[in-house]
Structures are given as C-alpha cells and as structure tokens.
Image: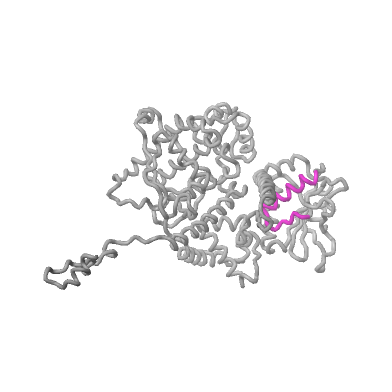
C-alpha cells in the first residue's frame, strides 16, 4: 500500500506502464524521470517487470499529504506519458508491486538498483529540501495542472447552470483531446484505424505538417514529449523521417484550403505574417502567427503607392514611441477592455512590421489567434480601438464575403513632433506570445515592461508604467519568478535569457491550446466558404445581360403597313 492509514505518503511511487505507451517510450520516460530526480538531488530505487514496465521509488524523510503526492506525480506525468498516476490518486486502495513480487504474467519484479545501494537509499531517505527542489523544477507542470483544474471546474459549473436552463434533450460536451498527439506521445494507436506503424506515423506527420511545423520542430518533439513517434520508427528514424516528412508536406499542401477569409465571420484563414501574401503558412512561435487576407477588392488605381519597407519600419518605430508615451495611458482609462486594447494595437504594429505595409486587412480570427482571445471579443474591440486611437487606426473599407475590413495605420500630425523627440526602443514589439495564454495579459505587460524597458525596472517602476496595481503585479511577478522567466537582482527585475519561452509554452499547455484554436477556426472557415459557394450570387458582365446582335424591342410599323399591325403597335 502506498498511503498510510491517515492518507500520508512516505514514498513516491512512479509506475511506468507498457499499457499506456510502448516499451521504447517507457524506457525513454524512465531515463527522463531519472534525470529530473538526479538534477534535484533525489535518490531513488528502480526495478522492472516482465511486461517491460518500470517502477521508480523515491523515499522521503518527512511524510507528505496524499494531495501533495498526487500533484507531484501528475506533474511528472506531464513530462512522461507512460507514467500511470492512478496509484497516488486513490488514498484508500492505491498500491504497487514492489521488487521481488510475483508478476501476474509470470516472473518477478527485478531490482535494477544494486541491493546494497537500494538498502542505503531506503534507509537514509530523501530530505525535504530535495523535494522542494523537485517542486521548483516542476513549477510549469504544477501551474498547468492547477490552471486546467480551475478551467474544468469553471466549465463544469457553467455547463451545469446551462443544463438546468436548457431543454432536456440538449447535449453538452467538455474538454479537448487530440488523438494524434496521444499517438505521438505514447506510440499506441487503434489497429482498426491504422493497419501498421507506417500508417500511424504518417497520420501524425500529416497532423504536424497541417499545423505548419518544420522538420526541426518535429525532431525536437521526438527527442522530448513525442517519444512515441520515435518508437514508431524504431531504428529507421534517420532514414525514413526526411522522406515521410516530404510526403506529409506534399499531401497537406494539396489538401489545404485556399483563399482569404472574412472578418467576424466563420472562416478565418490563419497564415504566417513573416511570409508574403499568397505564400504557404508556417505557424511559428513568433510575435504573431497569421498574415493578411489578401486585401480589399478595390482596384489598384484607388490606392496610394505603397510605402517602402524602410518607411514602414520607421513609421512603426515612431508609432511605438507614441504608444508607450501617450496611447497606453489613454487606453488605461477604458476599464477592463483597456489591457486587451493595448495588446490589440501592439498586434497591429507587429503586423505592420512583418508584412511591411500600413494597409491591414487582418480578420478577427487572425487577431484572435495572435492575442489568445475569442474572435467575437476582437470584433468588439476593433471599433473601440479605432475610436480611441486618435487617428492612428482608421477603417477605409468594409469587409465583404471572404475579405476582411481594411484599416489604414498612420502617424497623426499632432504626434509627429513627439515621435521625433523620443529615441526608438530596442527589441521587437509582440502581441500575446503563446506562454502568456496561460499566464495572462497582466503577466505579459509586466514581462514586456522588463524586456523593453530602457533600464531594469523596480516593482514601483512597473506599477507606474503598466498601470496595474502593485498587489496584482506582485502576484504575477512572483509566478514568473517561480517559472524562472525573470529574476530579481539588487531590487530590480531582469529577464532570465536562458529560459526558452517556446519550451515553457509547451510545458504549460499553451501550445496545444493555440493549435486547438487554429483547428477550430479552420473548420469554421471551411463551413463559411461552403456557405458562400452555395449562396453567393455571381456578378454578371454587361455582355451577359445584352446581346448586341439581337433586337430587344419592336420597330414601329410603316405608315403604309397593315392596319392590324399598327393596332398591335399602339396597344403595345
């Protein structure tokens, strides 16, 4: 039994099960967990079962509660998909087969750690500081689980309230899971759907290619959380992966929908702003993950000549100065919507720089992905931003069909002198980076204040520049410090440059959340385009309405013609 009669735990038992993942994934997870435990100073005892599973035992000097043990094991389970947390999820009946025990399939649990060394580890046990170091190392996973639990409770409460108000035959579903991601993590798949390992891994590669991953991203994932894909290749990874990845890219290129999408209508096409209009998308973890829709259907002669890339670059730099000096302070007075408006204008400037244009036809779903919000919220914020931007953002054309609204971005005359007086800031302006989908807008503002500040700020400096209360700001700074995103040095905050925000977004679950949003918008876009194809009235040219070779009227009769003919003409 794992728990004492009072529910406390003296030994963490990590059960790596071949029923949850392939043996290659189990072995990889065992090595990964061993590395985490060794890095935090925790000693452990290891054994293996005849079925190929592994057990890791982490004895503790001081007992911890069942809830604490469950949190730690579930957090380790995020890093190791073959880890079965169920023994620690049942305080009354949770148990594990210890070394030397008979196995149900025959044979016994075999000790891997040398007997004398195992005896010493189980006798001395691990001190509390080492367990605290493990908690610190698992801070992103612990935060992810806490955030997911909160969202699940809120979703369940909302569903329960709606269920009482809805008709009896209404259906409600919650949660999101990606079956292909599970295959990539565990290497297990449904034999009824995929006949062989080859078909299963091609399905996974097609999924990653549809998400606009690169081959380097796939390789990095196979070395980390997607070890199941590596297990599907076995020893043939280096030879087959490049060939099959090329096939996956070719397949998704032929299957990908084309054409622009409308603003605030079901059907947002999501493309990379770092590529030109009409090029293939590539969803990178950059400032913004989507690009322009293809422009307003106005003729080219109605537009002014496009500014040069250098002119756009200088315009964005000037607008950034105006944003930090004036506009941010105005948007603080917009209540709860103020923070969202501040990041929306940042997204506008980011699109200007990456697309090298001051005419933007970016749809609501595109902005929604860049900001981690719902497209309905963006549709409500855009007119408000136009109204309070003091002439910086102006809508010049309304979207129709598959085209989004077109906005012109300019530097008003009243701000030109201010922009010239201020020096340009270093660094890149961002919308909401994926990691802040989980941490929130306040954390994003605080991180930006540290990252783009002219000097390392204090908490008081951040309170003044962000307009956020000191209490709320302190909570978010502390959370980012725990995640090792920032650190405090001589009373001033600094960025921890060794922390990779992309990897942290993966560990917090922000990457999967963003990709789920992109997938949902793709389906809505496809439905919207299908509706347009069914109901769109085609434009008819003049020659299709009138045939110049055919008379569309009666000629009047001659004076000497038939009386009956003249009577018909008069009647007509």
Q: Which residue occupies the foreground of this view, 323 or 572?
A: 572
Q: Position of residue 129 (x, y in %)?
A: 75, 39
Q: How many numbered tags mark residues here?
A: 0
Residue 427 percent location from the top left of the image? 46, 38
Residue 73 within the segment the image draws in magenta: yes
Query: Which one is nearer the viewer's eye here, 552 or 75?
Result: 552
- Which residue ends up furthest to the right in the rendered image? 5
Q: Which colour style is shown?
A: one colour
Residue 429 visible, this orientation: no
Residue 473: percent from the left, percent from the top? Answer: 60, 32
Magenta residues?
Answer: 65-86
- 61 left or right of 227? right
Q: Quadrant of residue 279?
A: bottom left
- Image quadrant in which the C terminus is located: bottom left
Magenta residues, dominant SS class: helix
Q: Is residue 236 magenta?
A: no
Pinpoint residue 23: horizontal percent, then vertical percent: 69, 64
Who is closer to the viewer here, 230 or 2?
A: 2
Left/right placement of residue 60 relative to residue 418 reads right
Location of residue 75 with respect to 535 vertically, above or below: above
Look at the picture and state if 534 lies above or below 75: below
Residue at point 82%, 69% (across, down): 106
498 shown above or below 474: below
Question: Quick check: can you spot residue 168?
Answer: yes
Residue in view at x 37 percent, y 35 percent: 411
């Amino acid at each position: 039994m794992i728990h004492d009669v009072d529910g406390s735990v003296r030994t963490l038992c990590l059960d790596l099960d071949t029923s949850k993942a392939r043996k290659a994934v189990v072995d990889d997870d065992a090595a990964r967990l061993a590395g985490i435990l060794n890095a935090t100073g925790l000693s452990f005892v290891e054994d293996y079962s005849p079925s190929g599973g592994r057990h890791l035992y982490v004895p503790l000097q001081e007992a911890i509660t069942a809830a604490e043990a469950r949190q730690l094991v579930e957090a380790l389970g995020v890093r190791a998909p073959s880890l079965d947390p169920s023994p620690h999820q049942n305080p009354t009946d949770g148990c594990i087969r210890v070394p030397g025990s008979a196995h149900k399939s025959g044979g016994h649990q075999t000790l891997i750690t040398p007997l004398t060394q195992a005896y010493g580890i189980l006798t001395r046990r691990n001190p509390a500081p080492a367990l605290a170091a493990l908690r610190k190392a698992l801070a992103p996973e612990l935060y992810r689980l806490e955030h997911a639990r909160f969202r699940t409770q809120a979703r369940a409460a909302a569903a329960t309230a709606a269920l009482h108000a809805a008709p009896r035959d209404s259906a409600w579903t919650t949660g999101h899971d990606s079956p292909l991601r599970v295959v990539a993590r565990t290497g297990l798949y449904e034999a009824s759907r995929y006949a062989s390992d080859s078909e299963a891994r091609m399905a996974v590669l097609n999924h990653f290619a549809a998400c606009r991953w690169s081959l380097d991203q796939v390789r990095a994932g196979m070395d980390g959380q997607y070890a199941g894909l590596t297990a599907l290749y076995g020893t043939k990874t280096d030879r087959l992966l490049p060939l099959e990845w090329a096939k996956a890219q070719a397949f998704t290129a032929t299957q990908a929908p084309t054409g622009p999408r409308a603003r605030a209508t079901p059907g947002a096409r999501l493309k990379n702003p770092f590529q030109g209009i009409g090029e293939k998308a590539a969803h990178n973890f950059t400032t913004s993950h989507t690009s322009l829709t293809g422009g307003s259907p106005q003729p080219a002669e109605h537009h002014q000549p496009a500014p040069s890339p250098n002119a756009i670059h200088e315009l964005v730099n000037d607008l950034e100065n105006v944003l930090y000096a004036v506009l941010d302070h105005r948007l603080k007075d917009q209540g709860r919507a103020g923070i969202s408006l501040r990041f929306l204008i940042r997204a506008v400037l980011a699109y200007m720089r990456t697309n090298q244009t001051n005419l933007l036809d970016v749809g609501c779903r595109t902005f929604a992905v860049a900001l981690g919000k719902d497209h309905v919220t963006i549709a409500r914020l855009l007119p408000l931003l136009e109204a309070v931007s003091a002439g910086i953002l102006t809508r010049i054309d309304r979207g129709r069909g598959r085209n989004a609204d077109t906005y012109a971005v300019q530097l008003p005359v009243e701000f030109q002198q201010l922009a010239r007086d201020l020096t340009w800031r270093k660094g890149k302006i961002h919308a909401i980076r994926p990691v802040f989908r989980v941490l929130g807008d306040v954390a994003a503002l605080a991180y930006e204040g540290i990252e783009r500040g002219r000097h390392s700020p204090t908490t008081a400096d951040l309170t003044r520049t962000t307009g956020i209360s000191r209490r709320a700001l302190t909570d978010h700074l502390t959370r980012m410090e725990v995640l090792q995103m920032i650190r405090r040095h001589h009373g001033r905050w600094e960025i921890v440059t060794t922390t990779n925000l992309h990897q942290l977004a993966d560990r917090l679950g922000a990457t999967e959340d963003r990709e789920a949003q992109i997938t949902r918008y793709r389906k809505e876009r496809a439905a919207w385009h299908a509706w347009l194809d069914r109901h769109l009235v085609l434009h008819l040219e003049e020659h299709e309405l009138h045939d110049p070779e055919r008379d569309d009227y009666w000629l009047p009769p001659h004076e000497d013609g038939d009386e009956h003919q003249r009577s018909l003409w008069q009647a007509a």
